Image (cartoon, grey):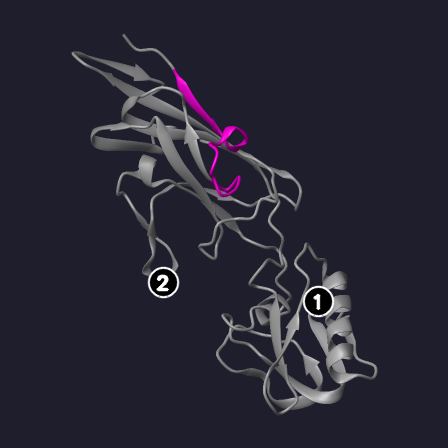
Amino acid sequence: MATSNYVIINSKYRENGSKSTADFIYSIGESLEISKLAVKSISMVNSEYNVKTDHNILLASTGGPDAPLAFPVGQYTVSEIMAQLVLLLDGLLGGVNTATKNNLTGKIEITTTSAVKFNTNIKDSPMGQILGLGDTTGYFPTNTSTTVNAPFLPSLQGSNNYHICSNTLGQGQGSLLVNNSKRAIICTVPSDVDFGGVIHYEATDIQLNQRKFNRPINIQTMHIQVLDDDNEVVDLNGSNIEIVLQVSLEHIGDTTTFGL
């Protein structure tokens, strides 16, 4: 006999000891032996800042050692990021420094009282990419200058996708992310709404989204992580995520299918 059933996972009801609403342990309250599952829907708030912790440093040099310019973590517009850059340059260089957006190209143009160049190593100076200065292993410009016109558009969209990961639900069916790190991704959700809006993913073809297991797995308790494009746990700033699964449940001597 086939009946429909769903498993609803909401980080609001995560287990004590969970790290955050994007890195949590969840218990469904009973032991289920699952042979197949699929993600039916995911809802979450797009609440990760576009300038986040450990990605908020710009290294600047006037010819000597690099000096770190630390941007406060938060959600910025282009105007706000330019204003913050000017404040930091004023503190480093003194005098009157400016940052404006070229109305034709949309790129940031910087003038400084002292000649400067910016480190564009994405690991050590990640704000270089956000400001459109580049993401190489060198400097822009190559030599110090009092006029710096960014070669690229500012990148303030934040993460393009969020990856829902669970070793419990993935059962070794890992997906390759950056630096050869494998995570069991059960679904990738596009970040297609503005900051503060609700991202809602709904499977258009549940069969294409189906994950089958060689033998039934127990999903009473599971570990869920939400990762961004940097392969880092998303800071949802306390907002919650809800995941709805369709499952096939195995019974001893009988097989009852739930939703698949």
| Residue at image point 33% right, 41% down | 167
Question: Which SS class for mark 1?
Answer: loop
Q: Residues within 10 Å of mark 1 (few under 14, many from 20)?
A: some
Identify the residue at the far front of this view. 17
In the rendered image, which residue does mark 2 sit on?
179
Task: Tell me if residue 208 comes above or below residue 182 in the rendering.
Answer: above
Question: Which SS class for mark 2?
Answer: helix
Which quarter of the rendered picture does the C terminus lie within? top left
Task: Tell me if residue 86 comes above or below residue 243 in the rendering.
Answer: below
N-term mark: 2 or 1: 1
- Eye-nearest disc, 2 or 1: 2
Percent of width and height locating residue 22:
50, 42
Task: Tell me if residue 98 comes above or below residue 250 in the rendering.
Answer: below
In the rendered image, which residue does mark 1 sit on?
106
Percent of width and height locating residue 254:
19, 11
Which quarter of the rendered picture does the N terminus lie within? top left
Inspect the magenta stretch and tell me whether residue 7 lies in it: yes
**Is residue 169 toward the left or the right of residue 80 in the image?**
left
Residues shaded magenta:
5-23
Is residue 204 in sight in this rendering? Answer: no
Percent of width and height locating residue 71:
67, 66
| Residue at image point 51% right, 44% down | 190
Percent of width and height locating residue 41:
48, 30
- Distance Cα–Cα, label 2 vs label 1: 32 Å
Q: Nearer the viewer, residue 43 or 251?
A: 251
The quadrant holding residue 27 is top left
Identify the residue at the far left of this view. 253
Q: Residues within 10 Å of mark 2 (few under 14, many from 20)?
A: few
Say what amino acid the circle numbered 2 marks.
Asn
